Image (cartoon, grey):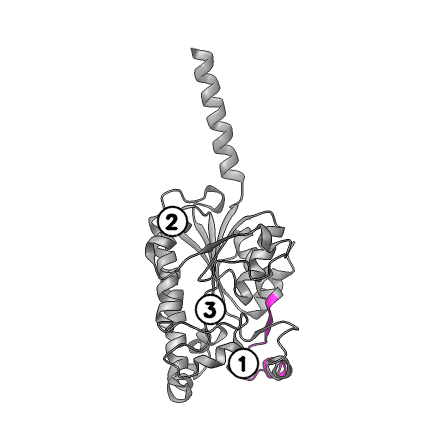
């Protein structure tokens, strides 16, 4: 009887030790079929993670892709609390790459077929508040209520959020005044949603938040934006206010994966931090 008890204690100790030293392995990517989300899914699979891709469509955006075929694709509405709760309860980390540039109230929604990486049109109720703030608040709330937080991340849940460079305008001299006087109404609502998420993330004691603030995101297939890439990059290099260097989607995706992998990735990541993160092994 004593030997059996010792065996149980020994096994429990080994399991606990393993849990403490092992990294998060199950990652949920909200917006997994999108331009950024699919690139993140690919890299997570390549790193050996068990990846769940969540989106309105819930299907592999590139059937036959050796990496994306290994993702568990789930059709789900991230504005629904219960849907998000179930996914988070079965995850050790998460990425939020849900978003749109022009919502239904902007009057410019049809332009998403051009500027959106996935080329999708928003639904009738797709406002910045619902698609950005509500979906991410649901993720945060689900994490806050999650009991079995991962041991390998100092007791905090790794959560990566794709914000935008313009969310940092108040940190620039005269930034708030320029935004108030010159920014169109749709942009103000867009930024309000992003900033409300950033604020909620920063107030959480259970989340290790990595907040990515890219400006224009691109790759070599984005012929519509390629002509303006040098303009942005030169303006940023010479110090023009309110303009950050553009970020390739590969760089952003690599940086997000490092945000899952490395415990020291915390807080706002601008283009220079993203570039450095993307080069880590």
Q: Residue 204 at what x, y percent from top left?
A: 36, 56
- The span from disc 2 to disc 3 (Cα, nearest Å) is 24 Å
Mark 2, secondary structure of its residue: helix
Q: Residue 5 lies in what quarter of the image?
A: top left
Quadrant hosting residue 187: bottom left
Identity of the residue drawn at 41% across and 45% down: 149
Coordinates of residue 40 in the picture (x, y in percent): 56, 59
Task: Tally the numbered discs.
Answer: 3
Q: Which region shows up in magenta? A: 233-249
Residue at horizontal 44 percent and vertical 62 percent from the top = 56
Mark 2 and mark 3 lie on one chain; the one further toward the N terminus is 2
Q: CA distance from mark 1 to mark 2?
A: 39 Å
160 sits left or right of 147 in the view: right
Q: Secondary structure at mark 1?
A: loop
Query: Is 81 displayed left or right of 244 in the figure?
Result: left
Counting residues from the start of the chain, the first of labels 3 and 1 encountered is: 3
Give the mark, 1 or 2, whose residue is nearer the N terminus.
2
Residue that mark 2 sits on: 86
**In the image, what residue occupies the spot 61% across and 83% down?**
228
Looking at the image, residue 220 sits to the left or right of residue 187; the answer is: right
Q: Which residue is mark 3?
A: 163
Circle 2 residues within 10 Å: few <14, some 14–19, many ≥20: few
2 or 114, nearer to the observer: 114
- The residue that label 1 is drawn on is 243
């Amino acid at each position: 009887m004593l030997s059996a008890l010792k065996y149980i204690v020994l096994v429990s100790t080994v399991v606990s030790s393993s849990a403490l030293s092992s990294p998060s392995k199950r990652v949920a990517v909200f917006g997994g079929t999108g331009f950024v989300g699919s690139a993140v899914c690919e890299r997570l699979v390549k790193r050996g993670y068990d990846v769940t891709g969540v989106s309105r469509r819930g299907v592999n955006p590139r059937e036959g892709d050796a990496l994306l075929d290994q993702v568990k694709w789930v059709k789900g509405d991230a504005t629904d609390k219960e849907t998000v709760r179930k996914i988070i309860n079965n995850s050790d980390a998460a990425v939020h790459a849900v978003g749109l540039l022009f919502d239904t109230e902007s009057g410019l929604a049809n332009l998403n077929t051009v500027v959106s990486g996935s080329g999708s049109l928003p639904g009738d109720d797709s406002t910045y508040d619902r698609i950005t703030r509500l979906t991410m608040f649901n993720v945060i709330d689900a994490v806050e209520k999650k009991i079995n937080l991962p041991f390998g991340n100092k007791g905090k849940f790794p959560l990566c959020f794709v914000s935008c460079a313009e969310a940092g305008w108040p940190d620039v001299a005269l930034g708030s005044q320029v935004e108030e006087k010159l920014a169109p109404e749709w942009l103000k609502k867009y930024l309000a949603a992003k900033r409300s998420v950033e604020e909620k993330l920063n107030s959480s004691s259970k989340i290790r938040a990595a907040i990515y603030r890219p400006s224009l995101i691109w790759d070599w297939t984005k012929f519509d934006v390629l002509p303006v890439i040098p303009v942005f990059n030169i303006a940023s290099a010479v110090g023009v206010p309110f303009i950050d260097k553009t970020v390739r989607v590969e760089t952003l995706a690599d940086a997000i994966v490092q945000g899952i992998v490395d415990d020291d990735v915390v807080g706002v990541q601008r283009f220079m931090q993203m570039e450095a993160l993307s080069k880590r092994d």
